[in-house]
Image: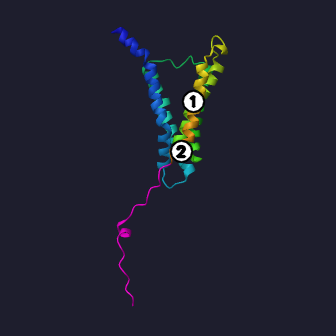
Amino acid sequence: MATESSANSSQAWLYFSLMTVLCWGVYGLLLHTGQLSINPGGDATMNRYKAFLFVGIAYFLVAVLAPLALLMMKGAAFSGYTSKGMWWSLIAGIAGAIGAFGVLLAFGAKGSPTVVMSIIFAGAPIVNAVVAIILHPPAGGFGTIKWQFYVGIVLAAAGGAMATYFKPPPPSPAKPAVTQASAAPSAPKANN
C-alpha cells in the first residue's frame, strides 16, 4: 500500500504538468473569445484592455487570494522572506502578465489563436531551455549536454514554423440571417 502511494506521489508532477498543458493550451482561445465577446461592436482596442482587466482579476483571485488562504490555513509564518526570493517571484509575475498582454496585442494585430499560440508554445520552451542552462549550467559543463537536447530545440522551432505556415484557413464569414419579410416574394406593383 505504501509503495502504491509513493508511486502515485512520484507521478504527481506529471499530473500537475498535464493540468498546466490543458489550461495553457486553451488560454489563448478563451482569451480571444473573451476579447471578441466583451463588447461586440465596441472599440477593438478597448475590448483588448477590458479582457486583460478580467485576466488580472482572475490572477488576483487565483494567485493572491487562494495562496493567501492556503498559507493562513496551514499556519505559515508571514516573515522570513528573502528579498531575493520576493524580487525573483515578482519579476516572474511581471513576465507572465506582460506575456498575457502580448497575446492580446498579437490578436489585435490580426494574429489568429491557432498561429499565435503555436508560436508561443513552440518558442517558450526554447527560450526556457536556453535561459535555464545559462542560469543553471549543467554540473559537468556545457559539453555534457546530449545532442538530443539540441535536436529537441530544433524540432520545437520546426513545429512552431510548420503550425504557422500550414495553419488552417479562417472560418467562412457568417451569412446574414434571412428575415421573414425579406424572404417573402414582393407583390407586383399596379400601374396607373
Q: Residue at x 56, y 37 (%)?
A: 162
Residue 104 image point, x, y percent: 56, 42
Kind of residue at badge 1:
Ala
- Residue topped by disc 1: 156
Q: Is residue 37 left or right of residue 137?
A: left
Q: Residue at x 62, y 16 (%)?
A: 145
Magenta span has 117? no
Per the image, label 2 sits on a secondary structure element best described as loop
Q: Main secondary structure of the magenta part?
A: loop
Residue 171 image point, x, y percent: 47, 50
Kindly give the residue lying farthest to the left in the view shown: 1
Q: Is residue 59 shown above or below 45?
A: above
Q: Is residue 119 visible?
A: no
Q: Which residues are magenta?
A: 170-192
Q: Quadrant of the N terminus?
A: top left
Mark carried by residue 102:
none
- Residue topped by disc 2: 112
Alpha carbon of mark 1 to alpha carbon of mark 2: how far?
20 Å
**Which numbered disc, 1 or 2, marks the residue that appears first in the sequence?**
2
Q: Is residue 188 shown above or below 58?
A: below
Q: Residue at x 35, y 78 (%)?
A: 187
Kind of residue at badge 2:
Ser
Q: Nearer the viewer, residue 18 or 39?
A: 18
